[in-house]
Image (cartoon, helix red, strand yellow):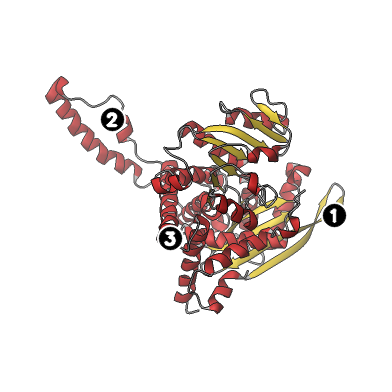
Amino acid sequence: MNTHATREPSFRQSVDLMFNRAVALMDLPPGLEEKIRVCNATYTVRFGVRLRGQIQTFTGYRSVHSEHMEPVKGGIRYALGVNQDEVEALAALMTYKCALVEAPFGGSKGGLCIDPRQYEEHELELITRRFAYELAKRDLIHPSQNVPAPDMGTGEREMAWIADQYRRMNTTDINASACVTGKPIHAGGIAGRVEATGRGVQYALQEFFRHPEDIAKAGLSGKLDGKRVIVQGLGNVGYHAAKFLSSEDGAIITGIIERDGALVSQTGIDVDDVRAWIVKHGGVKGYYNAQYVETGAAVLEEDCDILIPAAMEGVINLGNADRIRAPLIIEAANGPITAGADEVLREKGCIIIPDMFANAGGVTVSYFEWVKNLSHIRFGRMGRRQEEARHQLIVDELQRLDEHLGDAWSMSPDFKRRYLRGADELELVRSGLDDTMREAYQSMSEVWHARDDVVDLRTAAYIVSISRVALSYKEKGL
């Protein structure tokens, strides 16, 4: 129990506090400031579905925070804790997130108050289709107005059901597939979307470690190789972030925190092995190759180089912030650090890579998927072989030189295969995501270092985002 609960702001209040902290450093007209801050609209739906011989009533939400650009974009989450305040706060974060990474969307969010683990697959399909119907008939699912995506408790399966339901209701809409993103590949999805948020976390950290002055501010040195990482939540985002950081960047996963406890090992934990164990046993308890800690939250306070909260909001709060020892925290989840805890950590010198940037990989690749659906062609299909043909000309010329010069000069054995290979969709998606994360970090970092009154990356991110939203409204004549 958090003894500071009376002083702890809610998630919604945290977002508003951080917004207010940023706009206090900006020169916005009061009316425009208020227009950006408030949520445009929230639709609450209560619908019935006949299940197990009786009608069950479900409550869902779809919130539209800002329509400075359309369509608006944001995930749909399935969780028992879903409520209007949470959905509106998440929609606001989506507005700022999209602006920060320059995805041409406004911010939206949806949620259904349900524990998906309590239902069979066919029951979830009935519930999802009815929820989609209720939203779509009010244009709260629409390729040019409101485009959902997966969030906590949902995934490719649910997005495929939603897309199919929309198509059934709009049989002549040629762009129906673009009504939702995060779909399976064979249902209009895009390569790399499932792991996009985790991959974005990796690219965010890679970019951070390209800036020596920022590394020094965190009291760290060198590269990602050898850095000790604790991950809270081994869901889709946490799993992929931990997997890529350990297998590709040489980071050592020393802690994994899950619902039923945590695993700790200073020599490193095999992420894939733990994931397989969780799938089979429902949790980390009993895992044989690391020390089990029953009180998982205590592992947040363990010594490490990088802490990655990748599950629920508010896990780092006034009750534990002063005991957090990680010098660098990257928010893979939405709002894992409360506004009060953020202040405590800042005063301790902890560097926080904020959620609106750190987990923007999902919406970035969703943007690519939306563009793919509207263009009705996969990326790389038109240009890949032409790219290979041009490369072949260079390789042929190098081979001619190779034969002429003999042993004095020769191509490395694998050069020809690697150089000739044209980029496929997955490579193009990764390239676009990497470029997006680099550009967004640099825009934040520039504000952070240029102004003495901007004390952290979060404030810098809000300033960049709010400035872009304000400019969009001004250009509309508001």
Report which quarter residue 215 is drawn in. Answer: top left
Q: CA distance from mark 2 to mark 1?
A: 64 Å
- Position of residue 129 measured from the top left corner of the image (x, y, whole percent): 70, 54
Seen from this angle, which residue lies furthest front?
348
Could you tell me which secondary element the residue under label 3 belongs to?
helix
- Position of residue 209 measured from the top left corner of the image (x, y, whole percent): 43, 43
Taking the spot 47% from the left edge, 68% from the top edge, the residue there is 467
Q: Residues within 10 Å of mark 3 (few under 14, many from 20)?
A: many
Seen from this angle, which residue lies furthest top?
407
Report which quarter residue 130 is drawn in. Answer: bottom right
Q: Which comes sooner in the sequence, label 1 or label 3?
A: 1
Name the kind of residue labelled 3 in the image: Val
Q: Which comes sooner in the sequence, label 2 or label 3?
A: 2
Q: Which residue is mark 3?
A: 447
Which label sits on residue 55? 1
Q: Which residue is mark 2?
A: 416
Seen from this angle, which residue lies furthest left?
404
Name the kind of residue labelled 2 in the image: Lys
Between marks 2 and 1 in the image, the one whose residue lies nearer the viewer: 2
Q: Nearer the viewer, residue 21 or 141?
A: 21
Taking the spot 50% from the left edge, 46% from the top edge, the residue there is 200
- Position of residue 468 measured from the top left corner of the image (x, y, whole percent): 46, 66
The answer to whether 71 appears left or right of 387 in the picture is: right
